[in-house]
Amino acid sequence: MIGLLAEKIGMTQVFDEQGRVVPVTVLAAGPCPIVQVKTAEKDGYAALQIGFGRRRESLIPKPLQGHLKKHNAPGVRALKEVRVDDPAPFQVGQELTVSLFEVGSKVDVIGVSKGRGFAGVIRRHHFTCGRETHGCVTHKQPGSIGASAYPSRVIKGKRLPGRMGGARVTVKNLAVVGVDAEQHLIWVRGSIPGPPTSTVLIRKNG
């Protein structure tokens, strides 16, 4: 379950060995310093706390400053825990890089989707519009949402207008198309959630 934090650069396309166009997302992954190593004996579970990016000390909250100083870690922009089976090979200060991944392997990418604000049922749930002619006045309304006398309430889980996007999304089984260890770049086939410059977690699949 080892992973890396990365910044989403954007999408482009490359050509595979057969000359086919492959849509890819370019990610600037790592290097991610290990801030803390958690063990089952001390913390109840085995995990690595990794950082990403750099941030001035004056912009870091005081509690986080104390945590970083306690573990002699630099000021980082983001912190994330990733579970590991055996934390023994890792130590505080060690840097994780894109060399963890290889071309052809499968990864899961976790990010926060773009926030769309308050959206209606057509945009949010792909409902069909009402008729635009013959006196129809319910063009974009969701229609009937409740029962009659019983149970006299709206059933939970009803698809209705509401806040759309801005949620944690995991895209699984994406193929690694390319890895550039010198520039800390990784190409992942397909699209991933979030806008450019957003921070995502790349996790090995299996």
Image: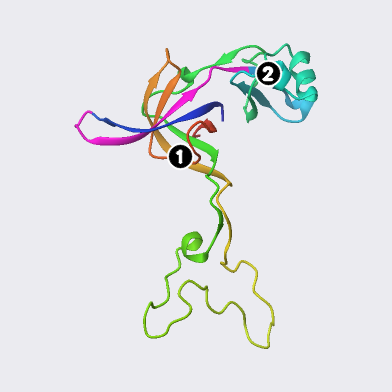
| In front: label 1 or label 2 | 1
Residue 29's label in the rendered image is none
**Could you say which is closer to the camera, residue 57 or residue 71?**
57
- The image's colouring method is rainbow
In contact (CB < 8 Å): disc 1 and disc 2: no
SS type, badge 2: strand
| Spot occupied by residue 23 in the image (x, y as percentages of width and height) | 32, 37
Q: Is residue 153 above or below residue 79?
A: below
What residue would you read off at disc 1?
A: 192
- Residue 33 sits in which quadrant? top right
SS type, badge 1: loop
Residue 35's label in the rendered image is 2
Could you classify mark 1 by the number of other residues whose Cα lies within 10 Å: few (under 14), some (14-19), or many (20 or more)?
A: many
Which residue is at 76% across, 23% downward? 64
Count of all numbered marks drawn on residues in the image: 2
**Could you say which is closer to the camera, residue 37 or residue 158?**
158
Q: Report the amino acid beneath label 2.
A: Val
Name the side, left or right, on which 183 lies relative to 201: left
**Residues in magenta, as a range:** 17-33
Which residue is at 69% across, 14% downward? 73
Which residue is at 65% across, 69% downward? 156
Name the side, left or right, on which 154 lies relative to 29: right
| Spot occupied by residue 130 in the image (x, y as percentages of width and height) | 42, 76
**Could you say which is closer to the camera, residue 34 or residue 51?**
51
In which quadrant of the rendered image does the N terminus lie?
A: top right
Q: Is residue 87 magenta?
A: no
The residue lying furthest to the left in this view is 19
Q: Report the amino acid beneath label 1.
A: Ile
For marks 1 and 2 on the same chain, the one whose residue lies earlier in the sequence: 2
Magenta-drawn stretch, dominant element (helix, strand or loop): strand
| Spot occupied by residue 175 in the image (x, y as percentages of width and height) | 39, 34
Could you classify mark 2 by the number of other residues whose Cα lies within 10 Å: few (under 14), some (14-19), or many (20 or more)?
A: many
